[in-house]
Amino acid sequence: MIYLRCRLLIFIFRDIPVIGFTFGAMILLQLPAEAHDYWFQVEGQEYVLYRGHHFGNHQGETIIPYDPAIIDHITCLSPDGILQLVTPPTRYPLRVSGPCARLTVEVNSGYWSETGIETINQSKEQVPEALYTWLVIESTTLLNSWNQHEHPSSLPQGLEIFLEKNPFLVEKGEKLRLVVLQAGKPRQGVTVAYDGNPRGVTGQDGRINIRVRHGGLQVITGSIQEPADDAGKADTLLRSTTLLFELPDAP
């Protein structure tokens, strides 16, 4: 039976992902003050999603309310292996009833424009003086327990990371085999990072190996950029995904 962990605040993703090494990515990397943290707070048998400046050295309000309309897709895999599609919220904040062995949230935070002075949550056509514009589609998965019959959640747009063996049996120094999927299909060319440090790029089969380097919270991310579908609104479409799970701390 899954239990709600003692660590109540769990980092899951930021509005502005860290990706590749292109000019556009460098602009994003120069905007840490504009990044918003999202985290789940466990309240009773519910996972509650908050956004704000909670991690790192952010300045500003601790909690910043978000429009629940940015949440596109939510799935909860129950401990007995039943995949449930959760209705997106109409009220702030998002609340998901647990327990979930695997909880996935997909967010579309819309178009972003960088003017050199500020970052605005608007499209290129709304900010004609923008230096660079992008659309962000993100997903994050919180893995609380392992089910040998993992069910891809088939996110409609975003990326998602799946593991091919039980990570809770892996010790420090061992490798994990993972696959990055987009709409249920392997995605090639995704840059995968561990604790924010790039470790490689997925192959044609969407797979890559990651070595576990410590106990505690594990943060594995994947990101890729591609031309935006509507060049009139953004230069780039950024897709990112985060997988979080917690291992026992080393003795």
Image: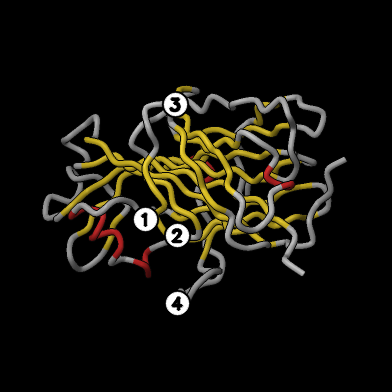
> SS for tag 3?
strand
Q: Which label lies toward us, 1 or 4?
A: 1
Residue annotated with mark 1: 18
Residue at image location 46% in from the left, 22% down from the top: 185
How far is disc 2 from disc 3 in space, using C-alphas?
22 Å
Residue annotated with mark 2: 196
Q: Which amino acid does label 1 sit on?
A: Val
Q: Position of residue 68 (x, y in %)?
A: 54, 44
Mark 1 or mark 2: name the one nearer the start of the chain. 1
> SS for tag 2?
loop
Mark number, residue 59: 4
Residue at image location 64% in from the left, 30% down from the top: 87
- Say if mark 1 contacts mark 2, CB within 8 Å: yes
Mark 4 or mark 2: name the one nearer the start of the chain. 4
Q: Position of residue 5 (x, y in %)?
A: 78, 56
Q: Which label lies toward us, 4 or 2?
A: 2
Mark 2 or mark 3: name the one nearer the start of the chain. 3
Q: What residue type is labelled 3?
A: Pro
Q: Is 168 left or right of 119, judged from the image as shown?
A: right
**Which residue occupies the foreground of this view, 105 or 222?**
222
Residue at image location 45% in from the left, 59% down from the top: 196
Mark 3 or mark 4: name the one nearer the start of the chain. 4
How far is disc 1 from disc 3 in space, using C-alphas?
21 Å
